[in-house]
């Protein structure tokens, strides 16, 4: 979907500088670049600024400055929202300020926890441990089936994912839109103060190459957590993910990896973002 409107967005990178440097060293694409990669195609006439609220030199914008934006897009992060470090509290304060300003927000993974905690809810470590690579059988709730974020989306689908924490307690004004057997809260829509925040726990901004790179970068942790017998198994998986990325019509690989169009088709995978623009951002302008 292509939007011709001229809009102004800020992309909020949730990683602190040392973490961003580690991603660079590992050859992993920066979180904001994952969004920029398709948002600039989806919104060719719009402008995008990247900000880093986890960094110590970040200053909270004024309400007037926030209201100049048409939307805010949050990336994932390696931070832990319930530990309330300065890197975290600066981001919670920013989300609260944007809620107050009434500007639409969207974000994935970390952003789901930020959206809920900033509105008074809670998050915790997922007792089942890391959910990684592909979240299987995400199902829309009855509210999700009716919500505009999922207009045109299958009622059950798979999606890229990488997280250790989860939303544990919703608050008034929050709708649970999607769930699966591993993580109860896979998607929310939060109405708080003057604003609204749509947030999937999974990553619509990822593609096969990016997820393969992230899995490879975290192979030590994934192996130590018991998901593989050794790191070679993770490397073998990422090699196959890269191979399918280069040859998405390879039926044998698709079947072996259990990967279908909900992962490979950009229009299906990124639909939540397109719907956010169409049904929340544009009506708010």
Image (tube, helix red, strand yellow):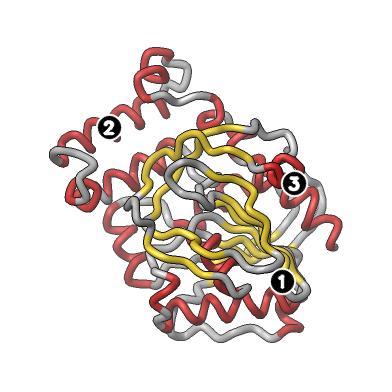
Of the image marks 2 and 3, the number of the one nearer the N terminus = 3
Q: Using the image as rendered, state which of residue 42 and residue 143 is in the foreground.
A: 143
Q: Residue at x 47, y 66 (%)?
A: 123
In three-dimensional space, the C-alpha distance between marks 2 and 3, rounded to whole angstroms, equals 35 Å
Residue highlighted by disc 2: 237
Of the image marks 1 and 2, the number of the one nearer the N terminus = 1
Q: Seen in the image, is 234 located left or right of residue 144?
A: left
Q: Quadrant of residue 245?
A: top left
Q: Name the quadrant of the N terminus.
A: top right
Q: Residue at x 62, y 55 (%)?
A: 188
Residue highlighted by disc 3: 147
Q: Are marks 1 and 2 in contact (CB under 8 Å)?
A: no
In three-dimensional space, the C-alpha distance between marks 1 and 3, rounded to whole angstroms, equals 17 Å
Q: Residue at x 31, y 44 (%)?
A: 215
In three-dimensional space, the C-alpha distance between marks 1 and 2, rounded to whole angstroms, equals 41 Å
Image coordinates for residue 278, horizontal then vertical, percent? 79, 48
Q: Residues within 10 Å of mark 1 (few under 14, many from 20)?
A: many
Image coordinates for residue 19, horizontal then vertical, percent? 34, 67
- Disc sitting over residue 192 in the figure: 1
Q: Is residue 50 visible?
A: no
Q: Residues within 10 Å of mark 3 (few under 14, many from 20)?
A: some
Q: Seen in the image, is 172 located left or right of residue 84?
A: right
């Amino acid at each position: 979907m292509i939007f011709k409107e001229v809009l102004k967005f800020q992309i909020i990178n949730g990683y602190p500088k040392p973490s961003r440097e580690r991603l660079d060293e590992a050859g992993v694409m920066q979180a904001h670049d994952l969004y920029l990669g398709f948002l600039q195609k989806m919104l060719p006439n719009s402008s995008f600024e990247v900000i880093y609220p986890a960094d110590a030199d970040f200053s909270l914008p004024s309400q007037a400055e926030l209201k100049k934006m048409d939307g805010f897009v949050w990336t994932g992060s390696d931070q832990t929202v319930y530990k309330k470090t300065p890197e975290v509290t600066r981001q919670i304060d920013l989300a609260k300020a944007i809620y107050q300003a009434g500007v639409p927000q969207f974000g994935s993974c970390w952003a789901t926890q930020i959206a809920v905690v900033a509105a008074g809810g809670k998050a915790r470590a997922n007792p089942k441990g890391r959910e990684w690579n592909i979240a299987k059988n995400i199902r829309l709730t009855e509210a999700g089936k009716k919500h505009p974020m999922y207009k045109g989306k299958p009622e059950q689908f798979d999606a890229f994912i990488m997280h250790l924490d989860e939303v544990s307690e919703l608050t008034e004004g929050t709708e649970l839109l999607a769930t699966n057997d591993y993580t109860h809260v896979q998607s929310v829509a939060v109405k708080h103060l003057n604003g609204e925040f749509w947030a999937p726990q999974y990553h619509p901004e990822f593609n096969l190459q990016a997820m393969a790179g992230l899995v490879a970068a975290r192979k030590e942790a994934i192996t130590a957590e018991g998901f593989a017998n050794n790191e070679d198994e993770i490397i073998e998986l990422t090699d196959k993910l890269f191979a399918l990325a280069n040859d998405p019509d390879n039926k044998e690989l698709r079947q072996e990896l259990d990967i279908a169009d909900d992962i490979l088709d950009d229009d299906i995978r990124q639909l939540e973002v397109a719907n956010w623009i169409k049904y929340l951002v544009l009506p708010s302008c």
